Each structure stands twice: as structure tokens, then as C-alpha cells.
Image (spheres, rainbow, N blue to C red):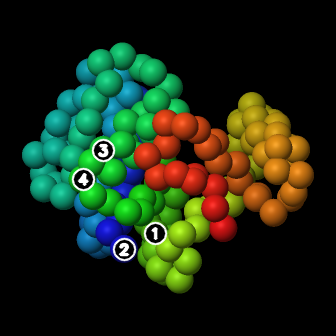
């Protein structure tokens, strides 16, 4: 198993360095896809690229959306020969300690998609809560199953088909 980390980012310059620092002990290469962030975030990413030799940054000139950033990141991972990717967000909502847990499960079931299930606090924006409920409902409808608790959008652009195996 040849794994890396992937973080899409759009204007989370205030949190990304803390996220990168928290991942240093995981000892995996990190791909960051800057999806057209502004100059402040770009400057932060430039400093990160100088300070951490295990971080590679790819950039979109303009914002194309998280999905496009993920496609760029997964393609970059495939080009570099990675077989597995742990995807995190740039806003520090994921615990670095969980990466090892995901890797352990991926080693046990290397042909599976391993998903975490988000836990939202009382301060989570309503739009995020409702958006999550809609996307989960659509996955349940499409699969005619409630087995998938967190949605994965499979597409022909995915460099690691089939995207949703278990």
C-alpha cells in the first residue's frame, strides 16, 4: 500500500499551517490543491512549501470548486504512483490522529473505500447540516441501501475506479 494525504483548499489560509503541522508525525507525503485562493492563502501555501519538504502544492488559477480540486488531487496522486489517499479538509475539522485509524482499516481491506462519518457540533451552519442530509438521502436512494453513511460521488473522472467498493 502506497498512501498519501490530500487536502483541497480554498481560502483557508488561517488554518492550513496548523493542519499541515498536525500531520507531520503521520509521515506521509501531502498533496495540497489550491483551488484559486486569494493572495493571503497563496502566501501561506508558499511558506508551507518552503518549510515542509514532504508537501507538494498544485494550483488552479481560478476557483473551480471542491470537486475539481479533488479530481486534480487524485490525478496527481495516481501520477505519483499512490494507491491510497487519505482526504482531509483545510479548515482543521479533522483530527490528525484519525489518519492512522483510516490507514489501519485500509490495510485490512485495501480494495475498499474507507469513509469517516462527520460529527457536527451545535454551531455547525444549518446549510451544511441540510446539505449533508440531502446528499446522504440521495446516496441511499441511488444505492437502495442505508449502508453508506457518508456520501461519495463516483464519476468517470476518478483515477481509482471503482470509487465506491466495499
Give percent across and percent down for residue 128. Answer: 71, 37
Give percent across and percent down for residue 107. Answer: 47, 79
Disc 3 and disc 4 in contact, CB within 8 angstroms: yes
Spatial CA distance of label 1 from label 2 is: 15 Å
Q: Which of marks 1 and 2 is nearer the N terminus?
A: 2
Spatial CA distance of label 2 from label 3 is: 17 Å
- The image's mark for residue 99 is 1
Regarding mark 2 in the picture, which secondary structure is present there? loop
Left or right, residue 144 beside residue 70:
right
Name which quarter of the figure residue 12 lies in: top left
Spatial CA distance of label 4 from label 2 is: 13 Å
Q: Which of 61 and 19 is in front in this view?
A: 61
Instruction: Decide if residue 151 is in sight here.
Output: yes
Q: Which of 32 and 123 is in front in this view?
A: 32
Name the residue tied to disc 4.
80
Q: Which residue is drawn at 13% across and 56% down?
A: 53
Q: Residue furthest top?
A: 62
Spatial CA distance of label 1 from label 3 is: 20 Å
Give percent across and percent down for residue 74. Answer: 40, 46
Q: Residue at x 33, y 32 (%)?
A: 34
- The image's mark for residue 160 is none
| Foreground tag (1 vs 3) | 3
Q: Alpha-carbon neighbours of circle 3 within 10 Å: few (<14), some, or many (≥20)?
A: some
Instruction: Decide if residue 21 is in sight here.
Output: no
Q: Which of marks 1 and 3 is nearer the N terminus?
A: 3
Q: Earlier in the sequence, mark 4 or mark 2?
A: 2
| 137 versus 65 height, above or below | below
Amino acid at each position: 500500500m502506497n498512501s498519501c494525504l490530500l487536502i483541497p483548499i480554498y481560502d483557508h489560509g488561517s488554518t492550513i499551517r496548523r493542519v499541515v503541522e498536525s500531520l507531520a508525525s503521520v509521515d506521509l507525503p501531502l498533496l495540497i490543491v489550491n483551488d484559486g485562493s486569494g493572495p493571503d492563502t497563496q502566501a501561506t501555501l508558499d511558506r508551507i512549501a518552503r518549510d515542509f519538504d514532504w508537501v507538494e502544492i498544485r494550483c488552479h488559477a481560478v476557483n473551480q470548486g471542491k470537486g475539481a480540486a479533488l479530481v486534480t488531487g487524485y490525478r496527481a496522486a495516481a501520477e505519483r504512483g499512490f494507491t491510497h489517499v487519505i482526504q482531509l479538509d483545510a479548515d482543521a475539522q479533522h483530527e490528525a490522529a484519525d489518519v492512522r485509524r483510516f490507514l489501519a482499516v485500509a490495510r485490512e481491506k485495501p480494495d475498499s473505500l474507507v469513509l469517516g462519518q462527520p460529527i457536527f457540533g451545535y454551531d455547525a451552519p444549518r446549510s451544511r447540516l441540510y446539505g449533508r442530509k440531502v446528499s446522504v438521502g440521495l446516496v441511499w436512494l441511488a444505492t437502495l441501501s442505508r449502508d453508506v453513511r457518508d456520501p461519495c460521488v463516483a464519476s468517470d473522472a476518478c483515477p481509482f475506479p471503482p470509487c465506491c467498493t466495499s
